[in-house]
Image (cartoon, helix red, strand yellow):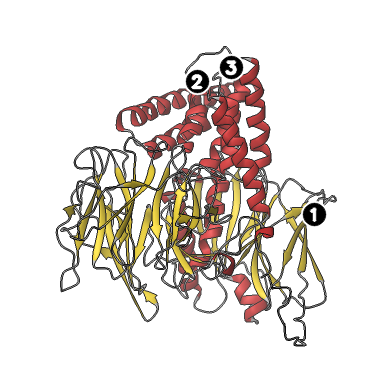
Amino acid sequence: MLISILAVNHFAISQDKEAAVQFLEIADEVYNEQKAVVAANELYVQAATLDTANIKANYMAGKTYIESVNKDRSAQYFLRAYRIDPKYRFDLLYWIGKGYQYGEDFENALLYFNRYKEKLISEKNYRGLDVITLNVVERSIYECENGMEFKANPANFKIKNIGKEINSDMPDYAPVLNADENVLIFTTRRRDGNLSEDVAADNFSYEDVFIAYKENDKWKKAQNIGDVINTPYHDSNISLNADGSQLYLYSDDTGNGDIYVSNMNADGSYSEPELLSENINSSFTENSVSESPDGNILFFASNRPGGLGGIDIYYVTKDKRGEWSRVKNMGPVINTEQDDYSPFIHYDGKTLYFSTKGRKGMGGYDIFKSEYDSTAGEWAEPMNLGYPINTPDDDVFFVSTKDGKRGYYSSVREDGFGYTDIYEVTIPDLLSEDEPLASKPEDIKEPETKENEDIEKVETTPEPVLQPVTLLVRVEDDANATTLSRAKVSLTGLEDNEVIAVRKTEKGLFRFLIKNPQAKDYRLTAELDGYMFKSLKVKIPAATTEPKEIRRKLELDKLREGLSSVLRNIYFDFDQATFTQESYVELNKLEKLLAQNPRMKVEIGGHTDKIGAIIYNKDLSQRRADAVIRWLKKKGVDPRRLTAVGYGKSKPLASNDDENEGRELNRRVEFKVTEKN
């Protein structure tokens, strides 16, 4: 019997290795010939899953993750390749570090970057093509050091997904708005509503420009802006002037990349796009633009010669005849030797937002802000907007509203529908136009008074000083109560995604300091490789003049066959099998867990309360479980790993006699591991 089992296992392993080779061959063709990186990534991951010892499959899985979305997932595949053969590529240590950097695990990133740096110095005569140069490594180290600093001191941005009326499960980006904030135009690669039946080389739909209107403070469903603007190929918007009368567009039909402008017609539609002046467009690439509120200055980005390096930001003014005059580089206060991109001039005419790969960033493009001093005739030193609006990935195309209190941009975040989504950002007072950000706290000085100036002394009652509420979190292994100090713990606003900084204590606790004048609900989450993640809602009381301390314990279960866990934060619209916005954080965490454990098979179980007929509830619970499965399939999870079961009201967790403590708990989705390896 033992011999038979070993023979079967050997045959199965042999089959897996053969299948891995086949997946690898197809992936190479898709990657090299079709240039479809996302599709190739799925195939490379399949190959690496079937044969974990296939070094090329693992390396290419990591490489294609870096080149697409979910870049942080590259680390596990680069690590596996390194463990198989450390000499497979000279730069493997660097790419492991890069994967950790994208995952905001800056400590591990620095560990591997420094190991690679030591290797680079000790083998300085190496001349292979698979080498990352010292200046690039040192820049990555600098970005990680910045990332640690920014993450430990997050700005209190409120970042909210703009919703499913605008965003889709495909890339949505480059939002632009008029001054009244009731027209939104953006670029999307969604299938639904796209004017082209074909797909581009990367296997996504071609870019199309969409438009949405706001009524009663709510966005209506976005629609294709029409065939006057969109063609069967790539079309993208890059700017809208203050009154919405001129829409600027980008096209590379000429082979270089140029800026076009479309004028609004009397009926609200837009005219045929026209090429901008040759003073602006050149034989090189121009790819982003912003018009000043008075229409007399145009800021744009270009890689034309004569700049400080890479892409630079330029400006051009109108002459007395209304023609665009000679183009000028914005100079070293704004531009760097790296790429500087996506300018947006605020409605005040003096505040410039832009993205750059230079300066004090945390990776990729970071969004910066600079203000023009008309008295001195110069731009102030640009300031990084900070974390969480900036991340180790590219953060570009930020636009502000007229009042300066909100902004819009696109990003890949945990509550996204898929790929990049468009987000509305509430800008903290410190970054508003009324109180510009200072480079350092000591730059903000008290107003000076003359020695002999009479000052009327007015007795005032000092404002009470609010003391923060301290939340201390311990993460433990549920089986043996061991402290899991390596867990990733986060606390974010349930409604507005406000990020609260976390610090570890000497005893392995995670400490959060919250100072809100009113009580507020937060999402507390703990994750660790090899464990089931856990999320729960925590109500933090209002801060008072007396300090308060709250303690919470999160118990994580090791992933094992038979493990069952309630996904409490997956919500459905009433009596429906459609997700609410609050569900997507949990869904994305579930998909990430499955990606980190590619051989694991699971059952998704749907459950209801006792309200309603047995047959109806069973059908509803099945449809809800099926909805989770469909979503996971769309995200690339192999359907053979997924099973959906509707249990109806047959397995209550609590009494159905009470809504808050019973029926609400029973309306749930459960995750069960049916096969671990």
Q: Is residue 76 visible?
A: no
Question: Between residues 668 and 453, which one lies in front from this camera angle?
Answer: 453
Q: Residues within 10 Å of mark 2 (few under 14, many from 20)?
A: few
> x%, y% of residue 35?
33, 33
Q: Amino acid at mark 1?
A: Leu
> x%, y% of residue 663?
61, 76
Dot 3 or dot 1: first in sequence order is 3
Horizontal side, residue 371 vs residue 81: left or right: left
Residue at label 2?
A: 130
Dot 1 or dot 2: first in sequence order is 2
Residue at label 3?
A: 87
At numbered mark 1, what does the secondary structure look like: helix, strand or loop? loop
Q: Nearer the viewer, mark 1 or mark 2?
A: 2
Assign the C terminus to one quadrant of the image: top right
Q: Amino acid at mark 3?
A: Lys
Query: Could you give the CA–CA distance between mark 2 and mark 3, rounded to whole angstroms?
Result: 11 Å
Assign the N terminus to one quadrant of the image: top right
Residue at label 1?
A: 509
**Residue drawn at x 43%, y 63% as measured from the top left:** 350
Q: Amino acid at mark 2?
A: Asp
Query: Could you give the CA–CA distance between mark 3 and mark 1, rounded to whole angstroms?
Result: 39 Å
Q: Is residue 234 above or below residue 374?
A: above
